[in-house]
Amino acid sequence: MTIRPNVLQMVPYSPGKPIDEVKRELGLERVIKLASNENPLGPSPKAVEAVSMMLTQMHLYPDGAAFQLREALAQKFNLPMRQVVVGNGSDEIIHLLGQIFLEKGSDEIIVGDPSFARYDAAAGLADCVLTKVPLTPDMRLDLVGMAKAVGPNTKLIFIANPNNPTGTMVSRQEVDALIASIPSDVVVVLDEAYFEFASGADDFPNSLDYVQRYSNVVGMRTFSKAYGLAGLRVGYAFVPEVIADAIDRAREPFNVNILAQAAAIAALNDEQYVRDTVELNRRGIETLESVFREVGGTPFSSHANFVMADIGRPAKPVFESLLKRGVIIRSGHVLGMPNCVRVSVGTDEGLEVFVEEFRTVMSS
Ligand SMILES: Cc1ncc(COP(=O)(O)O)c(C=O)c1O
């Protein structure tokens, strides 16, 4: 058999270490995971209730069109339903965008460096060109550089806003300038996985406004972060109708499962839960920024539910020492940022443990 060589060159996604694995391998009882930007509040009770009510229905296929969920999203965001698509996490929507736009080997995707790794996978799977544009010195996506990188074969530009792993944000003026300076057949994806944490900022460029104004912009969001449903896998996107039509042709017929659809509708209506999440997150960001400064590090300005910081020394040993102490974070060494760590906001108690263990590790 012959596996496509481009597939063999792809690097499998390396997720944050699972809690059970760390407990098992290191014989620890208390393990705190601050590595995957999950919601520390646990799921919304309304989502839990909706899922329990659907359990007896799981012998049935889900609604392949996810009608009720898409209708709820369309109503909430005041967009025609035919411009709303849903996926098995926004990961799937990224994958599908690659599938529908990238054809020839010369087709190109432009991404930030570093940015969210699944964009690279979309290019790798299609065996297309991946152009990575380094961040600005203040660790933000360089939209001027990304616009300059656009060439005749560019099909897609992915803008994670806020960016993962840095947490930094680009402004409305920067997005306006990028869109004005590129050809209108290049699709700009505004990936707003952390929208709910960032949207309070004055000059945050809400993708909805852009999708309404331009025919080449996609806005993408997720239920995995502020809505607390990472384990169920539901993402959604606001898209021009032609893209919705293409995604419908390319996607699996039942891509969002029956429990996920029910939970997402319930979570969407639990506005208090999202407000509580955002408030907890605000406190957590302050705590993280302050401990990073205390140890002489430099946190990057975060608009997400995690903070990345340059800690002024190799992050890998710090990551390993914290792991032995039952705290899982992300080390930047795998992202080409060897002196940086990325830490997700946890519960107040979880962050207290992190702060204590981090101080100990940094002073040793
Ligand atoms: C920028 C960004 N986009 C997309 C995703 C994927 O989210 P999900 O597939 O859980 O919806 C993530 C997850 O961490 C992310 O950080």
Image (tube, helix red, strand yellow):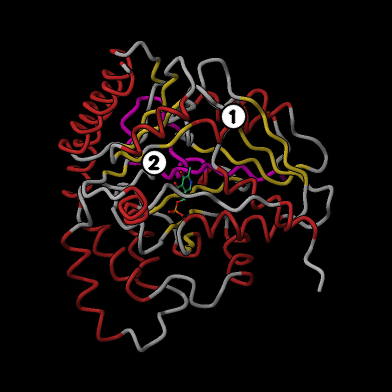
For badge 1, the amino acid type reads Gly
Q: Say whether residue 279 is left or right of residue 21.
A: left
> Residue 194 — which label?
2
- Quick one: which residue is furthest to the bottom in this view? 59
> Residue 66 — which label?
none
Front position in the image: 40 or 220: 40
For badge 2, the amino acid type reads Tyr
Q: Is residue 198 magenta?
A: yes
Q: Which comes before the other along the chain, label 2 or label 1?
A: 2
Residue tagged 1: 336
Front position in the image: 42 or 171: 42
Q: Is residue 86 magenta?
A: no
Q: Nearer the viewer, mark 2 or mark 1?
A: 1
Dot 1 alpha-carbon crowd within 10 angstroms: few under 14, some 14 to 19, many 20 or more: few
Q: Which region of the structure is painted magenta?
A: 185-210
Q: Residue at x 35, y 10 (%)?
A: 296
**The CB of the residue at mark 2 lies under 8 Å from ligand 1:** yes
Which quadrant is the C terminus positioned in?
top left
Q: Say whether residue 193 is left or right of residue 344.
A: right
Question: Residue 287, position in %: x, y?
Answer: 23, 24
Instruction: Identify the element where label 1 is drawn.
Output: loop
Question: Residue 49, position in %: x, y?
Answer: 17, 69
- Quick one: which residue is furthest to the front in this view? 27
Front position in the image: 210 or 307: 307
Instruction: Identify the element where label 2 is drawn.
Output: loop
Q: Say whether residue 239 is left or right of residue 46.
A: right
